[in-house]
Each structure stands twice: as structure tokens, then as C-alpha cells.
Image (spheres, grey):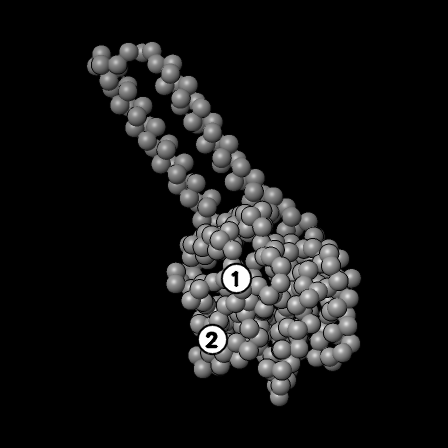
């Protein structure tokens, strides 16, 4: 098998069949497979996908028992993919299937482990574009990726990297974070980006916030290290301020009273302590969930 195309499917009963048909048109003559993963769709996506798996012998269909999220569905698809290269593409036609060949040619020419797509103009909603920029900025520092590399969902991954990604067994997969834990041999190529063929984006503000927190907490230690440095700095400034006040009091420049300053210091210190405990709680919660035996997805 040369190429696997993994498609996470969510409420796309009207677009998934045309997408699979166009994939077969543009990949004719190539040894390929299409892996459809239904992520708990509320419409007829599951039955449509089952019919596609009957019509096309190149289509494999997996259905998850509930909505686990896009990254979990993608991880499931990667576990079933058999190709030397695997392309991940959404089910909304915003990325034309024909551009898969562009990703393949770029990977082969540059011997890249991963090739991301990039766009001159993204046809997402402003909410998703804003969320993407925030996550992209965060991953530049937390994952050590190049600042000019856009982590798009439409990408190609070489077999060796897929084999490393699917070793992940926790409930919070972030595919790009797993990629950058394995390789830095990453390229990008300019492709077209279209408006959605049907419906609206499934990325709500809640999901974007969840993704941001997952990247912020789950794939780097720099947040807690940053708070540690901040705490050490504040402690040092507190000691310095205490010595200055003591010296001034001994010299008669300051009075011994100052309940307002004491209350301010107490409130600030308590708030900072609660912030530290909150961050620590996030880490402990992630650690607990990762070792609780929860699967990132459950197949039917």
C-alpha cells in the first residue's frame, strides 16, 4: 500500500460520498486506501460510510461509540492506515482532494517526514482563525516548531512517523505535538483552501479553548517552569522590598504600621498560590487521566 487517506467524519452525510468519489478519480492508478472514522456523528454519516465501504473495496470504515474529538478520530485512523504515506484530510471539501498529489510530490522531492499544507487565505470563520493563530503561537514555543510553519489539519506523514505516533495510548492526543516529539524534518507547501461545501465549522469556542489548554498543559513543561521562575522572582522582590522597608524603619523613615500593605501582600500572595495550585492540579489531572486506563477512542 503506497498511500492511506484518513478522514475523520463528523456530521458530513452530504459531503463524504462526493469526497470519496473524487479521491478515487484523482488517485487512479495508485495503490491507495481510504480510512473513514465516524466520530459519533448525529446525522446519517455512519450509514453513508458503511455503504461506501461496500461500494469501494479501497474504503475501510471504523465507527466510534461516541464523539471523542477530531484528534482521537485521526489517531484511530492512523492505527488502521497501512500506506507508506498517510494523508489526513477533513470531510468538508475545504482542501481539494487533488492537492494530495502536491503533498506527495513535495514529500518525495524533499525527503520530508511530514508535509503540512499552507494557504494564502484561509476560508475559516474568524473564531477558528483566531483560535488557530493562538494555538500556532503557543506551539511555536511549546513544541519548538518554526514560527513560519502553519500546523494545518491537512498534512502528509511518512510511515515511520505514523508508527511512532500510534504508540501514544493516552486519552488526549494532539497529533502535531506527537509529530514534533518524533521529528523536525518537516516541510510545507502552498495549496488551495476553499469555503466549506456544506454546514458550519464544528470548531466551537469551547473546543478551541479545550485544544489550547490541551497544548498548553499536555505537551510542554514550559508553563509550570515559567510559573516557577515567576514565583522565584516575586519571592526575590519580596525579600528585597522587606530589606528596604526594614532599613527604612530602622532609619526612622517608615512607620511600623501598614495594614493596607499587609492586606495587599496577603491577597496577592494568596491569588498567586491559588494560580500555582491550579496549574499543578491541571498537570496532576492530566497525569491521572493518562494512567487511568482510559482509551483515546472506542470502536464499535
Question: Can you say which quadrant of the picture contains the N terminus?
Answer: bottom right
Q: Is residue 247 left or right of residue 294?
A: left
Picture residue at 55% right of the left edge, 67% below the top: 94
Residue 112 numbered tag: 2
Q: Is residue 214 above or below residue 91?
A: above
Residue 224 numbered tag: none
Picture residue at 43% right of the left edge, 22% below the top: 266
Report the Cα–Cα distance between label 2 and label 1.
15 Å
Q: SS of the residue at dot 2?
A: loop
Q: Is residue 38 visible?
A: yes
Q: Is residue 243 above or below residue 63?
A: above
Q: Is residue 136 left or right of residue 173?
A: left
Q: Is residue 123 left or right of residue 27?
A: left
Position in image of residue 27 (x %, y %): 60, 82
**Quarter location, residue 91:** bottom right
Q: Is residue 170 visible?
A: no
Circle 2 residues within 10 Å: few <14, some 14–19, many ≥20: some
- Counting residues from the start of the chain, the first of labels 2 and 1 encountered is 2
Position in image of residue 180 (x %, y %): 49, 63
Q: Is residue 63 left or right of residue 114?
A: right
Q: Is residue 144 above or below residue 248?
A: below
Circle 1 residues within 10 Å: few <14, some 14–19, many ≥20: some
- Front residue of 185/204: it is 204
Q: Which residue is mark 1?
A: 176
Picture residue at 41% right of the left edge, 36% below the top: 231
Amino acid at each position: 500500500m503506497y498511500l492511506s487517506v484518513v478522514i475523520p467524519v463528523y456530521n458530513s452525510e452530504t459531503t463524504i460520498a462526493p469526497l470519496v468519489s473524487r479521491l478515487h478519480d484523482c488517485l487512479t492508478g495508485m495503490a491507495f486506501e481510504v480510512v473513514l472514522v465516524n466520530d459519533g456523528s448525529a446525522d446519517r454519516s455512519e450509514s453513508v460510510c458503511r455503504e461506501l465501504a461496500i461500494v469501494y473495496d479501497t474504503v475501510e470504515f471504523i465507527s466510534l461509540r461516541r464523539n471523542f474529538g477530531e484528534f482521537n478520530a485521526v489517531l484511530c485512523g492512523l492505527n488502521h492506515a497501512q500506506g507508506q504515506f498517510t494523508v489526513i484530510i477533513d470531510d468538508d471539501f475545504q482542501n481539494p482532494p487533488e492537492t494530495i498529489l502536491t503533498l506527495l510530490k513535495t514529500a518525495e522531492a524533499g525527503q520530508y517526514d511530514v508535509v503540512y499544507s499552507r494557504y494564502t487565505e484561509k476560508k475559516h470563520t474568524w473564531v477558528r482563525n483566531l483560535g488557530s493563530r493562538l494555538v500556532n503561537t503557543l506551539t511555536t514555543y511549546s513544541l519548538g516548531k518554526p514560527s513560519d510553519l502553519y500546523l494545518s489539519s491537512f498534512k502528509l506523514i511518512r510511515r515511520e512517523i505514523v508508527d511512532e505516533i500510534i504508540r501514544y495510548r493516552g486519552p488526549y492526543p494532539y497529533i502535531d505535538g506527537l509529530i514534533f516529539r518524533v521529528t523536525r524534518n518537516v516541510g510545507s507547501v502552498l495549496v488551495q483552501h476553499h469555503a466549506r461545501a456544506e454546514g458550519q465549522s464544528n470548531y466551537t469556542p469551547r473546543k478551541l479553548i479545550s485544544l489550547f489548554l490541551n497544548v498548553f498543559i499536555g505537551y510542554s513543561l514550559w508553563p509550570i517552569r515559567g510559573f516557577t521562575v515567576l514565583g522565584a522572582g516575586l519571592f526575590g522582590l519580596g525579600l528585597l522590598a522587606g530589606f528596604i522597608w526594614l532599613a527604612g524603619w530602622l532609619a526612622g523613615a517608615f512607620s511600623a504600621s501598614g495594614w493596607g500593605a499587609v492586606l495587599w501582600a496577603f491577597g496577592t500572595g494568596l491569588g498567586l498560590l491559588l494560580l500555582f495550585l491550579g496549574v499543578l492540579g491541571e498537570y496532576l489531572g492530566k497525569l491521572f487521566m493518562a494512567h487511568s486506563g482510559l482509551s483515546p477512542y472506542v470502536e464499535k
